[in-house]
Amino acid sequence: MLKLDNIAHSERLKPLSFTAEAGQLIGVIGANGAGKSTLLKIMAGLLNDVSGAATWADQDMTRWSAIERRQYLAFIPQQTQFQEPATVADLLRTAQINLRAGAKELAQWRQLSIEQFELEPLLERAVTELSGGEQRRVTLACTHAMNRPLLIADEPTASLDLNYQLLTMDWLKTSSQQGKLVFVALHDLALAAQYCDQILLLHHGALLAHGTPNQVLTDANLATAYKVSVDWLCNPKGVAMLPRRL
Ligand SMILES: Nc1ncnc2c1ncn2[C@@H]1O[C@H](COP(=O)(O)OP(=O)(O)OP(=O)(O)O)[C@@H](O)[C@H]1O
């Protein structure tokens, strides 16, 4: 279980508390600048000037060393800029450095990642020579290859085509159903409605609403947070939305 107790950033996030059981996909939504990345980075242990308490399985997350943190969580940043022309195969191996697992197990996780994100044809290519979407798939595959129980993804579908957006959301959903706790920041509210078990809606650095998609994606909340009204189109195959500016 993850428990945040009055977690806050001195300038960017007001005190926020919630608990989340493993086995869930939790969407983090809100307008530009609302505090989504800040919250995710705090959980990933990447920010200073943080107050409050954070525990994972009753362990104090704020005291984890970098190596300890790697045993429990994998983080997908909003943007990745590859500087070195490493091959995709090398990057997948590098992603697994310092993980406490056997060589056979690590190789199996890498192979599953390659299959999940269809990277076989790109394995020996330099990552710096790949397209933006291909680079994103490499980042996601590196996180997949870590196979950690807590997965934190900041707009993982940005820059992906429709097929890979759905493939990524399917992966996050399956990961949660297999027992991981997954947080995902999203701008696509239809994907959030369709895939997430719970949603945290942030507004001006504070938690405006928290609950199931039906509880959070109300006309009033969307008007406050995004200044839009939305017509929802729902059928058994999925959810689409028609937003209008208020
Ligand atoms: N490195 C930084 N230094 C100072 N302020 C920052 C920094 N990064 C973000 N902020 C500010 O913190 C607030 C929250 O930013 P954050 O990146 O968490 O928003 P977000 O909800 O992820 O937005 P977006 O949808 O645009 O990615 C914003 O007002 C932003 O300007």
Image: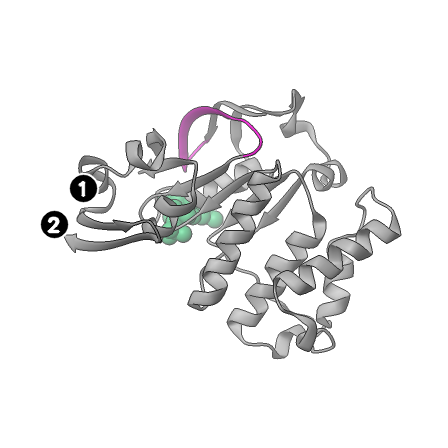
Instruction: Tell whether position 16 is magenta.
Output: yes
Determine if residue 20 is in view.
yes
**Regarding mark 1 in the picture, which secondary structure is present there?**
helix
Q: Does residue 65 lie above or below 145 as drawn? A: above
Q: Residue at x 42, y 43 (%)?
A: 36
Distance between the Cα atoms at labels 1 and 2?
7 Å
Q: Residue at x 74, y 77 (%)?
A: 124
Give the mark count: 2
Q: Residue furthest left?
A: 246
Where residue 34 appears, as percent x and y from the top left, is: 35, 43
- Amino acid at pointer 2: Leu
Q: Residue at x 62, y 40 (%)?
A: 178
Determine if residue 77 is in view.
no
Q: Bounds of the magenta span?
A: 9-23
The label shown at residue 77 is none
- Amino acid at pointer 1: Ala
| Residue tagged 2 | 246
Where residue 134 appears, as percent x and y from the top left, is: 57, 71
Q: Residue furthest right?
A: 103
Q: Is residue 208 left or right of residue 118?
A: left
Q: Does residue 126 lie above or below 226 as drawn? A: below
Q: Residues within 10 Å of mark 1 (few under 14, many from 20)?
A: some
| Residue tagged 1 | 223
Q: Residues within 10 Å of mark 2 (few under 14, many from 20)?
A: few
